[in-house]
Amino acid sequence: ATDAASAALSGAPNRSDIHWRLGFALAGEGKTREAVQQYQASLRIRPTSNCSLLLAELLEQNGDRQGALTNCLAALALGPTPVDRAKAGEVLAALGRGAEAINEYRQALALVPDLVPALNNLAWILATDPDVRNRNGAEAVQLAKRACALTDYQTPVLIGTLAASYAEAGRFQEAIA
């Protein structure tokens, strides 16, 4: 795939979609540095939310959370989608910026109320954030229960969030169960 994209790029160096596809292929091959360069080239030609989010994901996976946040914010500036908001929330939470993460997750859920990752991650922050001002056990339980119900209680990480939410709400027997 990378050979075909490289060949296409040599004939059309200003095609953002080809840079994007080549970056995607390179990321799939574990060639992070080259993938980042291709995503950045694509964004210089034509900024898109999708490319910004792919670059953010790649940067986050490689420990560059600040770079990931920069690209999440760029995606949001292009016309935020629920996925953009949820990814920004994820990066903000990883940076220890719980209140801002809560805001992004709330905005994502205002657009798509059943977005399971946003439900779960918001519940987790509300149940476990180091800053007690960001905690709300009762709301965390409601969000976590909804995420679990949407997945028929079949996803262990969601059940773990529900347990943490019950514990934050002081409902210890339900947390243990």
Image (cartoon, rainbow, N blue to C red):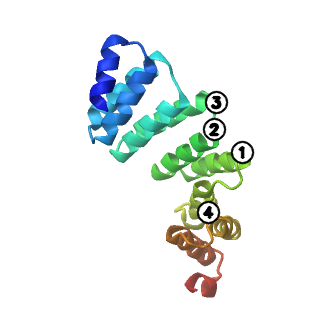
Residue 156, x across and y down, in percent:
51, 72
* Sequence-earlier tag: 4 or 3: 3
Mark 1 to mark 3 CA distance (whole Å): 13 Å
Crowd class of label 3 (few under 14; some 14 to 19; many from 20; radius 10 Å): few
Q: Are marks 2 and 1 in contact (CB under 8 Å)?
A: yes
Circle 4 is placed at which residue position? 123
- Judged from the image, the secondary structure of the residue bearing numbered disc 4 is helix
Q: Taking 15 as reference, is 157 above or below it?
A: below
Q: Taking 21 as reference, is 134 above or below it?
A: below
Q: Amino acid at mark 1?
A: Leu
Residue 152, x across and y down, in percent:
63, 71
Q: On residue 79, which mark appears?
A: 3
Q: Amino acid at mark 3?
A: Gly
Crowd class of label 1 (few under 14; some 14 to 19; many from 20; radius 10 Å): some
Q: Nearer the viewer, residue 95 or 4?
A: 4
The C terminus lies in which quarter of the figure? bottom right
Q: On residue 111, which mark appears?
A: 1
Mark 2 to mark 1 CA distance (whole Å): 8 Å
Crowd class of label 2 (few under 14; some 14 to 19; many from 20; radius 10 Å): some
In the image, taking residue 42 as reference, residue 28 lies left or right, namely left
Mark 4 to mark 3 CA distance (whole Å): 25 Å
- Judged from the image, the secondary structure of the residue bearing numbered disc 3 is loop
Mark 3 to mark 2 CA distance (whole Å): 7 Å
Kindly identify the residue that appears in the image at 60 percent across and 54 percent down: 118
